[in-house]
Image: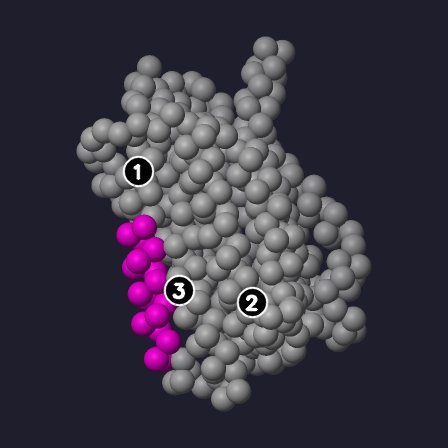
Amino acid sequence: MQSRAFNFTYIKDILKIAIPIILGNLGFIFIGVGDVVVAGRHSTDTLAAISLATAITNCIMIFGIGILGCISAILSNYRGAGKNVEKYFYPSLKFAFILSIITCLTILGCIPFIDKLGFEDNLVPMIKDYFFITAFASFGGYFHCMAKEYLQTFEIVLFPNLLTIFCIFLNLILNVIFAFGWGVIPEMGAKGLAIASLITRYFMGIVLIIYCYLRVHISTGKSVGYYKDLIKVGLPSSLAILIEFVGFNAIAVIMGRVSGIYAAAHNIICTLTSVSFMVPLAISNAAAVKVGFCNGAENYSDLKKYAYSSIIFSVCFMACSAIMVGLFPEFLTSLFTRDVELIEVCVPVVYVLCFFQMFDGLQVSLAGIFKGLKQTKVVMISNIISYWVIALPLGGVLGLHYKMNLVGFWCALGFSAVILCTIMFIVMLKQFRHYSYLK
């Protein structure tokens, strides 16, 4: 009975951090939905231009976001070890600024190559405009991510995520004003959407930095080893995210070459799973903070309980989600399209998705635990093996050789997710046995 009470306590502590993060994660999704809706209402060319532009710029920006996303895990370790983490605000801000410069220059450097990518001539100027503005928007986006992670170290999560919810409406209003024009502001289409995103990102970044000053007693001091830890922990974690991100997009490109309907179906399936994925992703963030604190404090008993609690909750939630998705596949896919043929392509894949979801929830929870343990290389290596050694080659055989098409690729993703979780889970158990010896 006592064990159950303990488990409930740890789950409650995890959810206390995770619930606001879930709202914030959903907020980011709906900000993107607002961009797509307004772009589609403006013109098909505008939607095509921002879709192509964001497919490339997001791959560049996610690399820096992945590194900055480890700030809370690292500082939670420091906090658990009794260090003064308030002094790491300015080093974190400086690091975010340096990453922003690198990202900005990288995006700007890609602009001359847009002409050579084979896009339709009428889309190229719009894509170039979007690239140019987005390059400078990276500063606001990275500052926001840095400040959010810094506050998450202290388990301050409500205001940052409520701010994201507010920015859904701010971004939508700005999209309409700059895309369609209003008063003295001319109609700018895709360029206007980029300007709206730039303003929204800077607003989010500046507001959160000010909030850091108001909420946390920021101090100064030496930050020896902090940048080394950020690179050591953040770089493998960032590469793992990038590997997964590129892997899913590669399937869209491969199947898109067979038929555009498969690329559209893959997009719908990914959108379906991304909504429910926001819950275990938030649990993963919370686990990184709690596990990181316990790791720094060398409290290995609580560390294991927080780890197992996050795993149990994520898997149970995704199992419930899988059941709901499996019961209403036609209805859910019809929310995205009225094309009967497209729905028929999606439905068989949805059933495979149900299996994939449970392991997807498990793998992201394990990734958060390893982030808290400051051992992210195993996450990166596991992702390389599962996506690039198993999923894509096996998907090619099933989908293309055996003519299973998109179902074949998703069967391969499901199998690779099992391998991914198995590798990480075994490594985690070995680490936990090591902690038992330390007792």
The image shows residue 212, relative to residue 35, as above or below, that is above
The disc label shown at residue 193, or none: 2
Q: Is residue 112 magenta?
A: yes
The disc label shown at residue 90, or none: 1
Q: Residue furthest bottom?
A: 121
Which residue appears at 52% of the width and 82% of the height? 123
Label whose residue precedes the other's in the sequence (2 or 1):
1
Which residue appears at 70% of the width and 41% of the height? 320
Name the amino acid, label 2: Leu
Q: Which residues are magenta?
A: 97-113
Q: Residue furthest front?
A: 184
Give how far across and how far down residue 44 sits, in percent: 64, 79
Quadrant location of the C terminus in the rendered image: top left
Name the amino acid, label 3: Ala
The disc label shown at residue 135, or none: 3
**Quarter of the image where one finds residue 428:** top left
Name the amino acid, label 1: Tyr
